[in-house]
Image: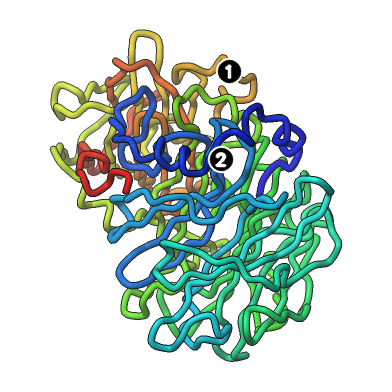
């Protein structure tokens, strides 16, 4: 769930008992402009109040569901419940009322959701299968967490909590974040949880979602600082070959990320329905999902149709070092863009790669394109491209020459800029946000964040998504990713290329202005 130290303040919130859920939902239903300072225009953000982990990602009946950790009563962490939004295309989102509410001294921490197509639980029927949420119950009056379920028979619009809760209890304080999926070959539901302070993943199995037995444990392994959280487990083909597959186990840790604070790591191996075994070639490594400061609590979608076949996930775009201090109002936090996942072979092994989902291309507007040319000290693109670098997508390919450092300067103003560059001496892709704008809210915000990236046949590619207060950079077709928040001044729209220590050769460049997802009435509150 993330940073349980925050629990110390939640019971002191003034006026909680005097605030009704009806009043909260009515306040949420007001039309939003979505034009506030720093408001993302094509990333999901709540209309108001605090949000963290994505939860319950599931597809059903033409809709992608996004549940998320939510405080209905304020703009900082507390009173954890599940907010709810749906989308038909993973891009345009429609807000719905709070789905699962904090009640009876139990907050609704992170978890997942499934569609019970075989009606194993008996909550629905084969004609109308239940959507079942599996979540951590966190007690507000004692240090205890357990796993619980709730179900919906109207595609997530209303929920009933199971009267037999909790379904898994171990008497532990830090036992959370169940990810559940159907494992076909063992014909059972598998629950992946973490023993957060023991750096272990624990697996459970069930035939009916109500009665669970412990299967095995994995860990400690990889990064073991802070606590482990928000696990996920899924199978992916290697190089697109459906006959050659491996399992990916994703585990978050906080603190202990690659540059401090929150981070996400993954392991590659085999899973037989009972035990996960890491590939020996990857043992002793820490594989980072994202090298930026602001990527956490990622979760993948369940029940995506077989004719689609993608494994898609999204994460929380924030860092617990400063999550409650970022300068946004009346909401706080956003999600990353949805990304599709692959396993690909490289000279140094098999690695997880990420790509923006193809649906994002529907947001593309004004387009600027150029071909091969040499880049010297600086090349101003704004006058040529006629695009403003506040909500844009960039795809660029560079061929290494004598330039030691090259890339882009974005969201530029008089004395502000964010740099996305490649260090050809150290073979590292980086984001420099030291002069990106507002950063005084926390000492851990400003910095340079780097990812190891070797050229492929002498070429470096960059795929960049800039959205007012965030920047996501995918290097060499998603081999590495860096996700970072930025808070530039409102007039910062400058965009340029640069090279230092010699020239760089630009092979191709595409820049698109991206439209806002909040411009349509269909995306407003119900």
Mark 2: secondary structure: strand
Residue 40 x, y percent position in the rendering: 36, 35
Q: Residue at x 58, y 49 (%)?
A: 81
The CA distance from mark 2 to mark 1 is: 21 Å
**In this picture, is 310 found above or below 31?**
below
Give left or right: position of 155 versus 245. left
Q: Nearer the viewer, residue 336 or 355?
A: 336
Q: Nearer the viewer, residue 165 or 190?
A: 165
Instruction: Tell me whether the residue at label 2 lies in contact with that at label 1, contact meaning CB atoms closer than 8 angstroms.
Output: no
Residue under numbered circle 2: 71
Residue 410 x, y percent position in the rendering: 34, 26
Residue 369 x, y percent position in the rendering: 15, 40
Q: Residues within 10 Å of mark 1 (few under 14, many from 20)?
A: few
* Residue 74 shows in this picture: yes
Whichever of labels 2 and 1 marks the residue nearer the N terminus, that label is 2
Residue 328 x, y percent position in the rendering: 46, 25
Residue under numbered circle 1: 441
Q: Residue furthest right?
A: 171
Give left or right: position of 305 versus 292. left
* Residue 511 shows in this picture: no
Snapshot colouring: rainbow
Q: Residue at x 45, y 66 (%)?
A: 58
Q: Residue at x 40, y 29 (%)?
A: 469
Q: Residue at x 77, y 44 (%)?
A: 226
Q: Nearer the viewer, residue 210 or 263?
A: 210
**Residue 216 figure quarter:** bottom right
**In this picture, is 150 found above or below 129?**
above
Instruction: Please identify, in this view, whether the residue under mark 2 or under mark 1 is nearer the observer.
Output: 2
Give left or right: position of 319 versus 461. right
């Amino acid at each position: 769930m993330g940073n349980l130290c925050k629990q110390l303040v939640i019971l002191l919130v003034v006026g909680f008992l005097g605030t009704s859920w009806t009043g909260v939902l009515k306040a949420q239903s007001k039309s939003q402009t979505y034009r506030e300072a720093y408001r993302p225009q094509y990333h999901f953000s709540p209309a108001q109040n605090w949000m963290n982990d994505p939860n319950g990602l599931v597809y059903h009946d033409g809709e992608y569901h996004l549940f998320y950790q939510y405080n209905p009563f304020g703009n900082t962490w507390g009173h954890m419940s599940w907010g709810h939004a749906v989308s038909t295309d993973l891009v345009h989102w429609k807000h719905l009322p709070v789905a699962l509410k904090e009640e009876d001294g139990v907050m609704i921490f992170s978890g997942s959701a499934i569609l019970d197509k075989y009606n194993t639980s008996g909550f629905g029927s084969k004609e109308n299968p239940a959507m079942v949420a599996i979540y951590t119950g966190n007690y507000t009056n004692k240090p205890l967490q357990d796993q619980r379920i709730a179900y919906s028979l109207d595609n997530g619009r209303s929920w009933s909590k199971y009267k037999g809760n909790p379904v898994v209890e171990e008497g532990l304080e830090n036992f959370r974040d169940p990810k559940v999926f159907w494992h076909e070959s063992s014909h059972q539901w598998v629950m992946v949880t973490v023993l957060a302070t023991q750096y272990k993943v624990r697996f459970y199995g069930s035939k009916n979602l109500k009665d669970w037995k412990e299967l095995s444990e994995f860990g400690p392994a990889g990064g073991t600082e802070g606590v482990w959280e928000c696990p996920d487990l899924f199978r992916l083909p290697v190089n697109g070959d459906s006959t050659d597959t491996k399992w990916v186990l994703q585990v978050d840790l906080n603190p202990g990320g690659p540059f401090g604070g929150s981070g996400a790591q993954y392991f590659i191996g085999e899973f037989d329905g009972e035990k996960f075994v890491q590939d020996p070639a990857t043992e002793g490594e820490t594989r980072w999902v994202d090298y930026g400061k602001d990527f956490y609590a990622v979760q993948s979608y369940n029940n995506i149709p077989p004719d689609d076949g993608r494994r898609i996930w999204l994460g929380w775009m924030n860092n617990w070092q400063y999550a409650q201090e970022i300068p946004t109002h009346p909401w706080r936090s956003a999600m990353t863009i949805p990304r599709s996942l692959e396993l690909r072979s490289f000279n140094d092994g098999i690695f997880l790669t990420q790509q923006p989902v193809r649906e994002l291309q529907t947001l593309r507007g004004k387009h600027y394109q150029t071909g091969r040319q040499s880049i010297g000290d600086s090349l101003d693109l704004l006058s040529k491209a006629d695009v403003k670098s506040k909500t844009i997508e960039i795809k660029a390919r560079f061929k290494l020459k004598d330039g030691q450092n090259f890339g882009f300067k974005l969201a530029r103003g008089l004395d502000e800029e964010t740099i996305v560059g490649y260090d050809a001496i150290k073979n590292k892709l980086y984001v420099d946000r030291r002069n990106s704008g507002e950063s005084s809210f926390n000492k851990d915000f400003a910095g340079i964040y780097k990812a190891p990236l070797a050229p492929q046949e002498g070429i470096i590619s960059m795929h960049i998504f800039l959205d007012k207060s965030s920047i996501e950079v995918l290097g060499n077709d998603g081999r590495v990713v860096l996700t970072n928040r930025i808070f530039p001044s409102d007039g910062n729209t400058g965009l340029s290329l640069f090279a230092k220590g010699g020239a760089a050769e630009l092979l191709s460049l595409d820049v698109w202005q991206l439209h806002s997802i909040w411009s349509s009435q269909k995306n407003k509150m119900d």
